[in-house]
Image (cartoon, helix red, strand yellow):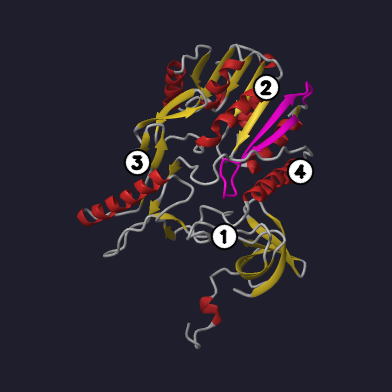
Amino acid sequence: MNEGESYASRTPRGFKPDPYSYHEEIELDVETLTNMGQGLGRHNDWVVMVRYALPGEQIRARVYRNEKNFSEADLVSVLKPSPDRIEAPCPVFGQCGGCQYQHFAYETQLEWKTRQVKELLWHMARIEAEVLPAVPSPKQYGYRSKLTPHFPKPKKNRPVQIGFLRQGSRSSYVEIERCPLVSDEMNERLAKARLEVRRNQIRNPYKKGATLLIREHLDGVTTNPKEIIREKVGELVFSFPAGEFFQNNPSILESFTQYVGRKASESGVHNLVDAYCGSGLFCLSAASRFEQAVGIEVSEFSVQYAIENAKANDIKNTRFVLGDAASIFSQIDFGGSDSSVIIDPPRKGSSEEFLNQLIAFGPQKIVYVSCNPATQMRDLQILTDRGYKVEEVQPFDLFPQTKHLECVVTLTNSGSRSEG
């Protein structure tokens, strides 16, 4: 920047200059870790959140945003490192937005994820409950079976760059040569995909960006989202289109699904409902524990694959039905008092309409699986207000090196419900 260029010209539009000016540098001690993966400390009693800063560290940070009750800053230097800080294996860690914790010892990652679930339970749902230690992933790297790299609209006379969004950006991408979260075979396919895209760009230039798919499965690696692939979980084999949702850490899926099925069956009920069944992962994994199991899904496509997966695995006590959001339990021909319900909603959680129908059905147990503990806690507040009691909370680390986790909360019908 030239000396004559004004301060205002380099300050982002809309920046609030209180309590810190743009890019003002401060020193602070990091006290804790947010569930978004940011280190949190206080400077002159003002909360400051800093990406890649770890609890117990003394750091220097550069402020880039002031909010009403806190500021956000980039990590400039670590003055006193945490004993749990390690060297990240990925050369673009800190630039790529995919990982938050590669610099954090794995055992300590697990401890903080467990602690964050407990804190969310209290702060969002006012539930004080024991949280069991997060179950570690058998693989800490090379565990992901699905990768979806992107490239923006290519610039003229410049090679297409394929990668992931830059940390803190919604439009800037970081070129990814190799991702340590996937296998060597998937990284090799990523390299081939990059060459193919660049050759295509020469012959027929792309008019917009695109998202690619690289998915490893029981029989190899595919880049075709419509290809029907297989994944093995325990003794079961599931078939589904490569582009459809399926949990993408195969190394932990057997213990994960077995736990969910066991918790659903512990009260001795005879019937199971899997209310977001997809291609049948939880319903079919748990079916042997029940007299009958019904999977409900709003996608007709997924229902077809769930039915085929039941046949392929010779599971005869299940059926799968197409659900209507307005009457999700209308096709269930048994009562809730002798039933357990597994729910695994999308990141946004369950709708109030669905929760009201679930409570009206009145299952003896609800096993709530979520990839977003924040929306899960919101829904738990509704369920506990209406007569369900939290029995057990068990996080699973399906996503090592990232801020994400899966949390399984088991609730029991206490028999008393408030109106509403």
When asked about the image quadrant of residue 101, the answer is: bottom right
Q: Secondary structure at mark 4?
A: helix
Quarter the C terminus occupies: top right
* Number of residues whose C-alpha sits closer than 10 Å to that of mark 3, classed few (under 14), some (14–19) or many (20 or more): many
Magenta highlight on residue 411? yes
Give the magenta range: 390-417
Disc on the earlier residue, 4 or 2: 4
**Residue at 43 percent of width and 34 percent of height:** 244
Going 55% across and 74% down the picture, which residue do you hit? 11
Name the residue tied to disc 3.
223
Above-or-below relation of 192 to 389: below
Instruction: Report which residue position mark 1 lands on.
Output: 87
Instruction: Kindly state the secondary structure of the residue where label 1 is placed.
Output: loop
Give the CA separation, mark 1 to mark 3. 32 Å
The label number, if any, that marks residue 122 in the structure image? 4
| Residue shown at 45% from the left, 19% from the top | 307
Does residue 237 appear left or right of residue 272 in this picture?
Answer: left
Query: Percent x, y for residue 167?
Result: 52, 59
Label 2 sits on residue: 360
Mark 2 residue element: helix
Kind of residue sitting beneath label 2: Ala
Is 7 rendered above or below residue 346?
below
Horizontal side of 1 relative to 56 (left or right) equals: left
Circles 4 and 1 in contact, beta carbons < 8 Å: no
The residue mark sitting in front, 4 or 1, is: 1
